[in-house]
Image: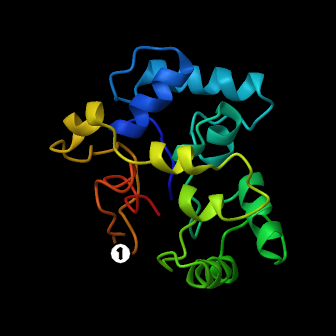
Amino acid sequence: MSILKKGMSGAPVKRLQAKLGIKADGIFGPGTDKAVRDFQKSAGLAVDGIAGPDTFMAMGLEELVLLRKGTRGETVKKLQSALGIAADGQFGPGTEKAVKDFQAGHGLTADGIAGPETLAGLDAFTEFTEETVSQAAVQPDETIFDSEPMPEIKGSEPVKGAMVEVPEEKSVWGRVKGWFS
């Protein structure tokens, strides 16, 4: 699932921290957890310290939104409505198929993952523009994270399923996408 939580590191964490106005070192530690929780509380979101699509949307970090099988929430509901399917807020096999069909019909890579490029093609997601799509790419000051291994997360479950290959130059999520089921 495309989320950021305590113990993770990388370019998406650095962007989150910068938006929160805290030290942007790219390491999701206790300070980032507290800042995310404070933001979630002030925005009327579920307070869990996990930054996912709904938190990213509320923060104006649309370039970090990545909806895939297993994702839940209001942003998924909005995607489902935009695709003309039942909007239950849970990204399951039906939503994945609808996303793949939309992508195939619009000349996009039909991978079933709705990131900024896919969402920009849907009328309901006016927040997603060409600029958002370009911001989703790894920026020059973020390449320092390329050689870092993924952190071991205490108490996390083993990764289930297959890795999703994403070229580094295409998405800031290239290193973290697919690590958590």
Q: Is residue 98 above or below residue 18?
A: below
Which percent across, then down, holds residue 47? 69, 33
Residue linked to disc 1 = 162
Q: Residue 146: image x %, image y %?
A: 20, 44
Q: Looking at the picture, which amino acid does disc 1 mark?
A: Ala
Residue beneath the point at 51% across and 59% down: 1
The front one of 1 and 83 is: 83
Q: How is the image coloured?
A: rainbow
Residue located farthest toward the left when viewing the structure as drawn: 147
Q: Left or right? Give the position of 105 relative to 177.
A: right
Q: Is residue 1 visible?
A: yes
Question: At which x and y percent is residue 104?
Answer: 56, 84
- Residue that appears at 39% across and 46% down: 155
Corner quadrant of residue 14: top left
Mark 1: secondary structure = loop
Taking 124 as reference, is 104 above or below it? below
In which quarter of the view is residue 86 placed?
A: bottom right
Q: Residues within 10 Å of mark 1 (few under 14, many from 20)?
A: few
Residue 73 visible to an observer of this rendering: no
Q: Residue at x 54, y 24 (%)?
A: 19
